[in-house]
Amino acid sequence: MGGGGAGYVTPVNAPAPDVLSSRAPVGVPRHRFAAIGWGLLAAIGFAVPVTVLALVVRGSRSELVEADHAAIAAATSVTRDHPGLRSALLVWQTALQPLPVYVVASLVCLLVWWRTGHRARAVWCFLTMMVAWNVALDLKYVVQRVRPVVDDPVSTAPGYSFPSGHVANAAAAGTALLVLLWPLLPGRAARGGAVTVVALVVGLTALDRVYLGVHYPSDTVAGVLVGSGLVLSSWVGFRAWGRRPGAARGEHRTEEQ
């Protein structure tokens, strides 16, 4: 207490309040701008071959276009001569429609979000798959490649041809689920098995589209690049976004692992 007043007197040697240090950080941390940059750089790396492929197939004549037409003629001839094969291809086509693929994949995301500590990772997986679904569809309207024309078609499909939506969605969902479940898979054998299963599903879907005569081989290649490329680009950015500034390689927030 001071000698003649009733108020509180701050001790002479007490440090003054540090107003600046008490404020919350303003703006986005620099490492998160870098994360966006890494994600965009990865996306460009996958977008370039897709763009080149789209420009080539949009041309009137090229060796690739001729090879596409020859492949469709040979593949549909095999399917036409084997009714059992055609039936199996149609079943696979129905099973790999976007809606059932993403419903199953979304349920996996929900289960991981609910039962494990990888909640941010599960949300990333779901949102990335939804973006991939829409990007693959939008690209069809950008490129506007007409579907294969076969004299005696074994199957038909609406819309444009490039890229293959079935393949893009299978690749996107498969790649996203691999990334989501990777830290939960016990050991190299399980991880190797998961990669093999995804590769087989995507590969069989690509063959399905060609042998039914509804997509050219180049459409399916573009589908793989779009689906897997978008997911991996998103993961590069997401992983860098969650890394603590100055953290050593492999040291990330535990929730993202």
Image (cartoon, rainbow, N blue to C red):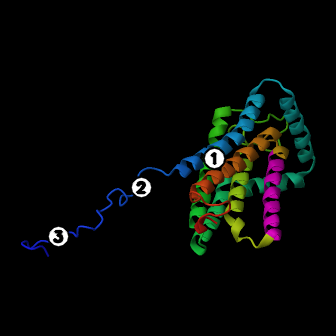
Q: Residue at x 69, y 51 (%)?
A: 232
Q: Which residues are magenta?
A: 188-209
21 relative to 133 in the view: left or right: left
The secondary structure type at the circle numbered 2 is loop
Image coordinates of residue 53 in percent, x first then y, are 76, 34
Query: Type of residue at label 2?
Result: Pro
Q: Residue at x 65, y 54 (%)?
A: 235
Which residue position is annotated with label 1?
Answer: 38
Does residue 158 appear anywhere in the picture? no
Query: Type of residue at label 1?
Result: Trp
Q: Main secondary structure of the magenta part?
A: helix
Which residue position is annotated with label 2?
Answer: 25
The secondary structure type at the circle numbered 3 is loop
Locate the C terminus and report the quarter of the image it occupies: bottom right
Image coordinates of residue 72 in percent, x first then y, are 86, 38
Q: Residue at x 85, y 31 (%)?
A: 64
Q: Nearer the viewer, residue 203 or 22?
A: 22
- Mark 2 neighbour density, 10 Å: few (under 14) some (14–19) many (20 or more): few
Image coordinates of residue 147 in percent, x first then y, are 75, 36
Alpha-carbon distance for marks 2 and 3?
32 Å
Residue 187: quadrant of the picture: bottom right
- Mark 3 neighbour density, 10 Å: few (under 14) some (14–19) many (20 or more): few
Does residue 58 appear anywhere in the picture? yes
Which residue position is annotated with label 3?
Answer: 9
Mark found first going from the N terminus, 1 or 2: 2
Mark found first going from the N terminus, 2 or 3: 3
Image coordinates of residue 99 in percent, x first then y, are 64, 56
Query: Type of residue at label 3?
Result: Val
Residue 94 lies in the magenta stretch = no
Above or below: residue 223 compared with residue 10: above
Alpha-carbon distance for marks 3 and 1?
55 Å
Q: Nearer the viewer, residue 253 or 146?
A: 253
